[in-house]
């Protein structure tokens, strides 16, 4: 199996307060070079629901929206071996460099792991110590693929509302 390289750079700047960490982009996302590029993924609809806004169709506008809300994105995996797009088939993962990222952006207050695989890889290869001064939470995956902890879209939105506490947007 040929290693897959994650070509998506972190979406982060000095304003980022909430940092969402996925596992490894799926095939469609890598082909489009977009975070959550599979139109069936619940990520963008959840963001729209949380902020009560329409999500732009244009990817650059989507990223600008996240930045305006002080939300950043990256993945726990820099490269791995995987059949298809399923997290369950990921092997030989190499983590991204979170130590440098968190040193560079100390203002990040909350790290949300989008699903169990992103959390497990981060914990195993990076270590939770790097999150020492930050809050973190393992969230239900936004993947459209049913997993062992299947939640409805509304249940996912309810759980993901946690990020609003760190952004001052609770009354949106």
Image (cartoon, rainbow, N blue to C red):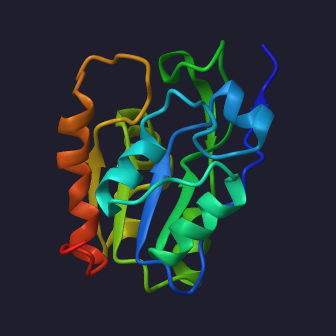
The image quadrant where one finds the N terminus is top right
Residue 117 drawn above or below residue 168 = above
Q: Say left or right for 130 vs 96.
A: left
Q: Residue at x 64, y 37 (%)?
A: 37
Residue 35 drawn above or below residue 101 = above
Count of marks, rendered view: 0
Picture quarter containing residue 133?
bottom left
Picture quarter containing residue 116?
top left
Q: Say left or right for 114 vs 94.
A: left
- Counting from the top left corner in percent of width and height, residue 115 is at 37, 37
Of residue 121 and residue 158, the one placed in the foreground of this image is: 158
The image quadrant where one finds the C terminus is bottom left
User: Is residue 68 visible from the viewing direction of this image?
Assistant: yes
- Counting from the top left corner in percent of width and height, residue 124 is at 43, 43
Q: Residue at x 55, y 64 (%)?
A: 98
Of residue 40 and residue 86, the one placed in the foreground of this image is: 40
User: Is residue 80 visible from the viewing direction of this image?
Assistant: no
Residue 46 drawn above or below residue 19 = above
Residue 151 drawn above or below residue 106 = above
Q: Residue at x 65, y 14 (%)?
A: 84
Q: Residue at x 61, y 34 (%)?
A: 93
- Counting from the top left corner in percent of width and height, residue 87 is at 50, 24
């Amino acid at each position: 199996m040929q290693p897959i390289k994650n070509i998506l750079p972190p979406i982060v700047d000095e304003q980022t307060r909430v940092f969402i960490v996925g596992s490894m982009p799926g095939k469609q996302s890598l082909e489009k070079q977009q975070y959550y590029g599979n139109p069936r993924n619940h990520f963008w609809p959840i963001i729209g629901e949380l902020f009560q806004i329409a999500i732009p169709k244009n990817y650059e506008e989507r990223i600008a929206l996240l930045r305006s809300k002080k939300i950043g994105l990256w993945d726990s995996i820099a490269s791995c071996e995987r059949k298809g797009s399923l997290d369950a088939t990921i092997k030989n993962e190499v983590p991204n460099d979170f130590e440098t990222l968190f040193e560079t952006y100390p203002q990040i207050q909350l790290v949300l792991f989008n699903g169990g695989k992103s959390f497990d890889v981060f914990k195993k290869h990076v270590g939770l110590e790097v999150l020492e001064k930050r809050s973190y939470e393992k969230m239900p995956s936004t993947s459209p693929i049913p997993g062992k902890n299947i939640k409805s879209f509304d249940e996912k939105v309810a759980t993901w509302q946690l990020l609003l506490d760190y952004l001052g947007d609770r009354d949106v």
